[in-house]
Each structure stands twice: as structure tokens, then as C-alpha cells.
Image (cartoon, rainbow, N blue to C red):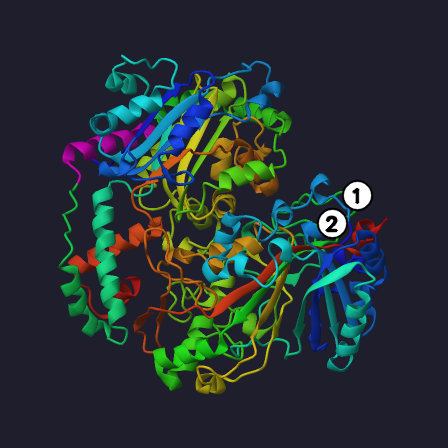
Amino acid sequence: MGQGQLFVAGVLRHGVMPELSALLATMNAAPGQADPVNPLVPFGRIASLHVARFIVLEDPSLPDRLIAPTLPVHEPTRLAFIADFDGTPDGLIADLVAIAAPGLRRIFGHCADFRDDTDLLRWLHAHRIRSAATYVNWRGRSAAQVREEAALHDVLRTARLAHPRASPEQLMPILRAAGAAVTLNPVAAPPVAWRIGETAHFLLLPVAAIALAPLLLPSLPFLAILLRWRETRDPVIAPTPSRERNRTLSALEDHDITNQYSAIGSLKPGLFRRWLTIAILWVIDWGARHIFGKGRLARVNTIHFASWTFLDEGRRVLFASNYDGSREAYNDDFINKVAFGLNLSFSNGLGYPRTRWLILDGARHEQDFKRYLFHHQIPTQVWYKAMPGLSTYDMARNTRIRRGFENPPSGAALRRWIAEI
Amino acid sequence: MSAAAAESGDIQAIVDRGFGSLRAARYLLLRVINPAAARAWLRGLTVTSLANARSHRVSRVDQIAFTAAGLRTLGFAPDSVPGFAPEFLDGMAGDERRSHRLGDAGENAPQYWDWGAGEKEPHVLLILLSTEEAIEALETQIVSALPAAGCTLLALNRSNTRVGHEPFGFADGVSQPALDWEGTLHPGGVRDRIYRNRLAMGEVLLGYPNEYGFVADHTAKGIGRNGSYLVYRQLEQDVRGFWQWLAQAAGPDGAGVLAERMVGRTMDGAPLDGLPETPVEGTQDRDNSFTFAADPDGIACPIGAHVRRANPRSSDDPQGRRGFFRDLLSSAGLKGTAIHDAVAAARFHRIVRRGRSYGPAMSPGEAMAAGEDAPLEPSGIHFICLNANLARQFEFVQGAWISSHNFAGLSGESDPLLGHRKPVNGGMATDAFSHVDRQGCPRLIGGLPRFVTVKGGAYFFLPGLKGLAAILAD
């Protein structure tokens, strides 16, 4: 039930980047935009996929560790495959191997521990990394449902455009006739077992909070002092963006209403920041699962899928998202609506703009924050989106339209329904 | 730090005012051939400061701005002076991805522009404002000086029309932010859950705190302070096509009503019926004392109407200010719906407009009656705006609002006036316009043609007077 997320990553052999980049580029129809029928991994043949990407995790911010001598100077460069889909990760891996084994072997063959005789299926399973937090715009809305509802919207809109002067009451039978041609498979209700599992998981947070309260409450003043001590001393690293690198990144952007976003960086050194990050990402994951599964992550409405993933024994985090609009607008939307959330989820990053009390300031230092983000953003070599042209608003609206189509409204509700088509 | 008002002697006057009483304007787009001669000539021009304009009624205004290419040609290497905006250094037409975001695609693409791209990129913009009687002599005097000044004239754009009206017949420039010249505004916090029109000085002038309360980077050595980025786009308007399409879509009698819904104001500039008068901090004008907060579904003013795209008048939170706990819930995304929170915090995306229109005046009736092949002199707008952050202000307004095909969650639409109508990735058309008619009936019109074509454009840096002197120093 619902969408799953898969994150597979392998360490690259030294010096394979030029060859691998060239290979990955052959999968694209436009810069960074996967061709759905590319011969290596024909994403379009996997009907359960929503979004997917191949990305080389080459971290331009590693030199920042000069200010954190306890962190190793080098980290491995990985090739990652990240996908959001309907079903389970095991199911997707099986589909991938069935459809694209030769292509996947060629791609992951650039990884250090991938040999000619490697068992692909086992290798993929062995190289899975469980993301610390994932976000899904609309929990349980399958790719098939999105497609069917988009097809319904298309025919209803065409019918509506053909009758510009009809009244809502005149339009209704026309729309019903037009929509009848579209197949709408019923949306399955979640099974009872699944719902019980979700409720149990929901209770984890309050139970954990109550259980840990005797421990946490007395230590709160000390943790607060520790936090403020760190916050007033941690250095900020927000260099002026390179225009050349900006061109590299923006060449991959705005080909569709939706864009990919990938950013990698080190956590601040020390156990305090490490455990704080673990706790915060756990809460974000919990919130995304139980509170924010109907179109909004706090007030941000434009993210289709996002994930936060620890790398290198928790020394680094990769943030990957799929969002609507252009990068600058995405940054602005974030800063203006959920600066507190950005601070929570990223302020343990090395060089993050100065925060107060974990949630204040930080991203509100607009210029520093945008530069910090840019400093950590990395190009996504291959990005696939199964529903070109559709925004999160479109998908939600199409679901509302479908509901009205199946339960015809009247009066004022009919007018509102037609206005959305 | 002193307030901007105290430095008016260092600020080009156009930052504060449009000089509507000076009815004639000339926009000279120059290319520099001989840098030394050009610098010397430009040094000799008397640039009107805000202090000049405040102390007496001026009859002539001269303002100077440079593109990055212009600064490079003049020998002032902007790329090695830290602090210039990357968008300025790249230029408006310098990158296909930028053009795509700005809607400069199809027939609007820079390759078709009269000026602005490649060899036709201007170096210097000289703005001359004066009376209709005096402007011809002034123009002749300046143009005849150009050869000796080491400059060639790329374009000489003229505007002699009534300031405050655009060629389709609508009042223009009605909404402008009120700049915080005295430096008394403290942006941020719970007060900004209510829309206001007063704007932090740092949103327009470099060197002052912006809407985030911070002074953004600007060019060092005193060159950036009191400067601004000036965006110039020449937008040609198909007046005949506009009114004839309207007459066809809504009938000759309904054309005006539909046009007003597409614009989002009446032809006189008043808010549309059904938008209640609301006090807005920073304006006393009835035509600006309203928001769209009471019209979240676009019944009174269509969501996609031009003025609603250009300034959705949204506060930091559409839920407004309702007390601590309700505000907290709303901030966490637990109140309201996604679609009604698609466009927030307009205060970060305001621009100051100083443009003027050009071409002959034509009434809607004349435009509807004009024959298909009657020769018409071109008309349009020399769109000029000022802002401190090109990416967050002009490019955001133009890219995320005006030319976005998903503004406020809409789809299948583009700006009813400015859209280029090309379909998006996935094949969805963008040539529709949806609105609710006076009877409360939802209407969807498809097949809008392109009414406006971009004919030129560039990003300029409008320095303060000290900055200007530094740029022009030998």
C-alpha cells in the first residue's frame, strides 16, 4: 500500500567519471532529462515509477572540512540511484532487473565492487541505503491513478473548451458523456492490517516522548546551553556562487514544470549534532508519514517527493527532492514559508547560516542561505518523471475533478467543480 | 546607517519618481566604440539626482545606466569587482535557460529582438525626460554629439504618449510600492501576516536593509551603494489583434468586460467589482486599497488576471493574523489548503515600475474597426523597472508569476496579456483563460493569440552618482 522509496549507491572506481558521465548522458532526451524509452534503463516501461534519478555524489563541499579537523579529508564518491514508486523496494528491484539488467550492469559496472560475474539482484539489495526521512506529496496516490485522472481532466477540459457559452447545467451531460470514455479504476481502500500498522507507528512518537521525558526534561537546560554555545560559534560557509557552475546546474533545470534537486554536505562534527540530526530526521519522517501526506509539507505545496539520507556512517547527508517551479522560486518559497523547518532539517550541516534556538534566523539570512544551498547542490545526471507537465496542484485538482465526476455535484458546488476543469 | 532620504544627492532621481509631468521621453541605447571618449562625454552630462528633483521643479531629467557588457567595454571590469549580481553579469539574453524562464521563447526569443542580444546588446542606456516642446532639440543635441563621444546609437526609443496609460487603453503603473525612504520600517514578524504596500529600501536601492532585514552584498568601494538594477524590456502590443479577438470572443459589447477581467482592473485602473476596500499600509489610494484575500477562488478577479499575476497582494500567510496559537497552527501547515497558499509573501517580489508607452493612441472602437491590412504604427511599452535583487524580484515576478503556466496552481493558462502561448512539456496548451462571469458562471476560453511580443531587453546597473563617477573615472 502506498509509495515506496529506493536508494541504491555504490562507490565508484577511481577515474571513471568521464566514461560514466558520457554513458549516463546517452540516456537523456534533453540535458539531464531521461528519455523514457532509453535502451539502458527504459523507465517508461516500469508503470509503478513516479520519479527516478541516477546521480554521481561528487561533493564539492568536502574542502569545508578544513574547519572540522576531526572529520576525514576524503569520502568516497558514489553513484546513486534514487526512485519513488508504488509498492515495495523489493518489487521495484525485481522489475528493474527484469527490464534493464544489461543496462544496469553497464552503469553500476563503474562501481568498485561490481565485477562481470556479480549477481545484479544481490548487488542491488546489498547496496540499498535506507533513507532517514522520506516525504511523499500525497500518500497512497498511485502513478496509475495520477495518469487516469489526468486523462479524465484532458477529455473534460477539451469538452469544456468546445462549449464556451454553455451553462453549468448544459455542460454537465456533455462532460459526463466525454468522461465516460476514460477508464477509472477504483482507488483501493487501505487494508486493515496496513492501517493498524500505521496507527502503531503514529503512536511511536508520543510513546517515545513520554518514555524519554524523565530523561530529556532534566537535561533540557544543559542541551539548550550546549546548543546556544555551538550556535554562536559554528562558522558559516556561504561562498559567492560561481556563475559557471550555476550554468551547469541550470542547464538541467526547467525543462518540465517539475525539477530535481540534489544537495550533499557534511554534518557538523561531534555526537551532539549527530544525534540531534537523527532525532530531527526521525520526527520529519514521522510527520511526513502521519501529518503531511495530503499535498503539503508544512506550508510547502510544491514537493512531489523528497528524502534525507545519511552517508558515510552519518558524517554526510544527501537531500534529494522533486519540486515544481524554478530553483530560485523553490528557495524563496522555502525561506518565506518554512524557514523554521529548513533550520531544523539542515542547520546541523557544516557551514549553515547562523541559527538561534535551532529554528530562528538561519534561512532568514536569505543571501547566506541561498549561497549555502548552492554550495551544496550537485547536478543530477539523469532524472525521470513519469507524468510530464503535471504539478502537485494539477494532481490534487484532478483527484477533486474525478470525485465530482463520480459523484455529480449540483448548484454552487457544480459551478465550483466546473471551474476547476 | 543613515536613511536613504539623507543621501538623495547620490541617488538618480528615477528611483523615486517617474516624472509624469515631463510628457516626452527618449531612451537612447548606445554602444561604446571608444571607451575614453565615451567616459569623458558621459562625465560631462548632468545626471539628475533625487536631491535636484526634490529641491526644484526640473524641466529635464538625464539618467544613466550600464549593462555588464557596457561596463566591460568602458574598461571597468565588473566580473572582477565582487558584488555585482550574477544575473546582471550574465545579461538578460545571455542564457537559453534564463530566456525560457522569462518567457522569451518562440517569437519572443532574443534572436528576433530589435536590440538586446549579441551584437545588438546595448552598453549604455541614457534616459532623457523633458517637455514635448523641448525634447526634439534635446534629442538632436545628444545624437549629434555621439560620434565625437565614441558611441554609436543602437536604438533611439521615443515615448510621447500620455504617461500612465498603455496602448490597449488601460491605466498603467497604478500600483507602486511605497519606498521606506526614512528607514523606519522593520519587516518580518507577525505584522507581515497582513499585506502592506510600504517596502524596505533595500528592495530597490543597494546598501540598505531589505525585506529580510539584511543588507545584501553589493559592489564594494562605494560603487554599489545607492545604485539599483534597471530592467528594460520593449514590449510591442498588437492593439488591433487584442480588441478584434475580444470582439470575436465576447461580442463587441462584451469585449470591454472580458478585457477588464483579463487585466484584472477596469480600464480606469479601479479594482474590479466585488473586491472590498481594505486599508493597506503604505497607500491612501482607493485603487490600491484592496487585496485578493477575500477572493481566494478568483470570483471577483480571475486568479490568472494580469494584475493578479504581477502582484498577488499576498501577505506572508493567507490565513492572516489570528492570534498566537492559530498563527502557529497555520505556520505548521495545519490550517487552510494548499491551493489557497500557492502564492505568498508578495513583499519579497515587488518592483518599482518606471516605464512609458509608445506608439499612436487608438481607442478600442478604432482598433476593432481597423482593417486587416491597414498600416499601423507599432505601439507598446518601454517597460522599465527597478529592483535590488534581479533573481528574487524581476525574474521571479516575470518567471514564477507572469509567464508561469502554473501560477497559483492554474494550468493550461499563461498571462492573458503577455503569454507566448507555446505548449508546455507534456503537450498541455497554455492559451486558455478562465474566469467567472458576472452571473457567477465559470468560463473557459481557449485559443488566445499572442498579443504582446518582446522586441528587446537588457539588464542595466543604475549607479548612484558617486558610483557613476567611479565607473567613468579615467
User: In the picture shown, does residue B357 fall above or below A27?
Assistant: below
Q: Is residue A202 magenta?
A: yes
Q: Earlier in the sequence, mark 1 or mark 2?
A: 2
Q: Where's residue B237, x and y in %?
A: 52, 72
Q: Is residue B6 above or below residue B261?
A: above
What residue did someone put label 2 on?
B73
Is residue A405 left or right of A43 when viewed as pictured?
Answer: left
B71, A4: nearer the viewer:
B71
Q: Amino acid at mark 1?
A: Lys
**Which quadrant of the figure has residue A262?**
top left
Q: Is residue A50 left or right of residue B138?
A: left
Crowd class of label 1 (few under 14; some 14 to 19; many from 20; radius 10 Å): few
Q: In the rendered structure, which segment of residues is drawn in magenta? A: A190-207
Q: Is residue B182 visible?
A: no
Figure disc tally = 2
> Looking at this view, is A68 or B428 the one in front?
B428
Q: Is residue A83 left or right of residue A362?
A: left
Q: Residue at x 34, y 24 (%)?
A: A107
Work out how far the residue at label 1 is from the one at label 2, CA to CA, in angstroms: 20 Å
Residue bearing the label numbered 1: B221
Q: Secondary structure at mark 1?
A: loop
Left or right: where B204 falls relative to B190: right
**Three-letter amino acid code at the position of disc 2:** Thr
Label 1 is found on which chain of the structure? B
Membership of B416 in magenta stretch: no
